[in-house]
Image: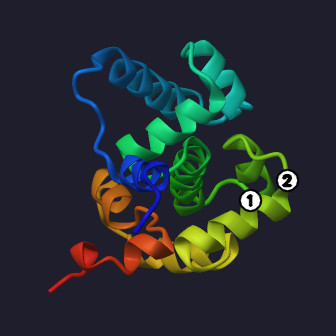
Amino acid sequence: MCHPSRAHALTAARRPINLGNLSDLARLRRVRDRIDREYALPLDVEALARDAHMSAGHLSREFRRAYGESPYAYLMTRRIERAMALLRRGDLSVTEICFAVGCASLGTFSTRFAELVGVPPSVYRRNATRATAGMPSCVAKQVTRPVRKREARSPSRTLV
């Protein structure tokens, strides 16, 4: 039998968000909206948490519970989505795009891009330009949305 405090810790991790605490949900939404708006600026969890009047640990736990990924992962997904659009446009170099979306290191940008998209930025540019030719940009954005590897394996994301 499990120790009572250990059982509590296990169930706490699976507990759904307390919908009664609307102020926390509102703060999480403001953090997410800020990331969406300011993805190209230097953002860190501590600053986001401080502005939301939460501890960094609490923000990270509750953000993951609400949105399925950490604030940092969400930020990187937004940056990669914007980079994908800029790569499809084709008028900037990969290095220029890296800095335009708020990444400070070309190596980290390329690694994260390949993790999310499955190919390096230069290969994506070559392939996506042909694949999305003639598609409205709003459709191309939806079709080319990055999918994390763990999401790709999820049965709910499988196409029939």
| Count of marks, rendered view | 2
Q: Nearer the viewer, residue 26 or 135?
A: 26
What's the residue at 45%, 36% (across, down)? 62
Q: Considering only vertical position in the picture, is 128 above or below 24? A: below
What's the residue at 84%, 64% (across, down)? 107
What's the residue at 74%, 66% (across, down)? 110
Q: Nearer the viewer, residue 25 or 125?
A: 25
- Where is residue 139 drawn, in percent x and y? 28, 58
- Where is residue 142 drawn, in percent x and y? 32, 58
Q: Nearer the viewer, residue 79 or 68?
A: 68
- Crowding at dot 2, Cα within 10 Å, few <14 / some 14-19 / many 20+, comes out as few
Name which residue type carries label 2.
Ser
- Crowding at dot 1, Cα within 10 Å, few <14 / some 14-19 / many 20+, comes out as many
How is the protein colored in the picture? rainbow
Name which residue type carries label 1.
Phe
Q: Considering only vertical position in the picture, is 82 above or below 52? A: below
From mark 2 to mark 1, how far is it between C-alphas?
6 Å
- Answer whether labels 2 and 1 touch (C-beta < 8 Å): yes
Q: Considering only vertical position in the picture, is 124 above or below 135? A: below
Q: Nearer the viewer, residue 9 or 32?
A: 9
The residue to which callout 2 is attached is 105
- Where is residue 3 drawn, in percent x and y? 47, 58
- Quarter holding the N terminus is bottom left
- Quarter holding the C terminus is bottom left
**Position of residue 39 in the picture relative to residue 141 (left or right):** right
The secondary element bearing badge 1 is classed as helix
The quadrant holding residue 51 is top right
The quadrant holding residue 102 is top right
What's the residue at 41%, 48% (across, down)? 8
The residue to which callout 1 is attached is 109
